Amino acid sequence: MGYVTTHVLDTAQGCPGEGVKIDLYRVVNGERSFLKTVTTNGDGRCDHPILDGDELQEGEYELAFHAGDYFASRAGRAADNEPAFLNVIPLRFGVNDATQHYHVPLLLSPYAYSTYRGS
């Protein structure tokens, strides 16, 4: 069975993105449906696949990475003191074969990010 994983790397500090909150949604006809919230561990990964087995179906999903909260916590301040340039980063991706591994990493800094389909 297939599964979805992620890995957050803080490229500004050169370390894993520990403690990043990620909301997962399924997207059907452009409408998001909340599935769950996960948080990255000390390695910037989740302890378990975000979706696996029968949970993973063909279709569209969105991972919403709470980057603003992450960088605010690293700076030792509340997230609502000032707006972050990057607050919540939505990454939509398609699953066309639910038997495959979909790895969706996020390379993150306070002012830029990138992603790709990893392995």
Image (cartoon, rainbow, N blue to C red):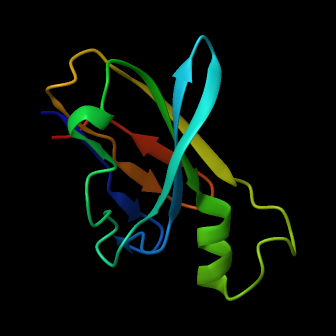
**Residue 48 placed where, x, y %?**
26, 60
In the figure, 21 relative to 50: above or below? below
In the figure, 59 relative to 52: above or below? above
In the figure, 82 relative to 77: above or below? above
**Residue 54 placed where, x, y %?**
25, 33
In the figure, 109 relative to 32: above or below? below
Of residues 16 and 98, the one drawn nearer to the viewer in this rendering: 98
**Residue 23 placed where, x, y %?**
54, 50
Instruction: Judge left or right: residue 13 versus residue 102.
Output: right
Of residues 61 and 113, the one drawn nearer to the viewer in this rendering: 61
The image quarter in which residue 73 lies: bottom right
Instruction: Judge left or right: residue 58 versus residue 2.
Output: right
The image quarter in which residue 33 lies: top right
* Residue drawn at 77 percent across, 72 percent down: 79
Determine the residue located farthest toward the front in the rendered image.
Answer: 54
- Name the image quarter holding the C terminus: top left
Instruction: Judge left or right: residue 55 versus residue 113.
Output: left
- Name the image quarter holding the N terminus: top left
Instruction: Judge left or right: residue 103 versus residue 75.
Output: left
* Residue drawn at 33 percent across, 41 percent down: 104
* Residue drawn at 27 percent across, 67 percent down: 47
**Residue 70 placed where, x, y %?**
59, 70
* Residue drawn at 67 percent across, 63 percent down: 68
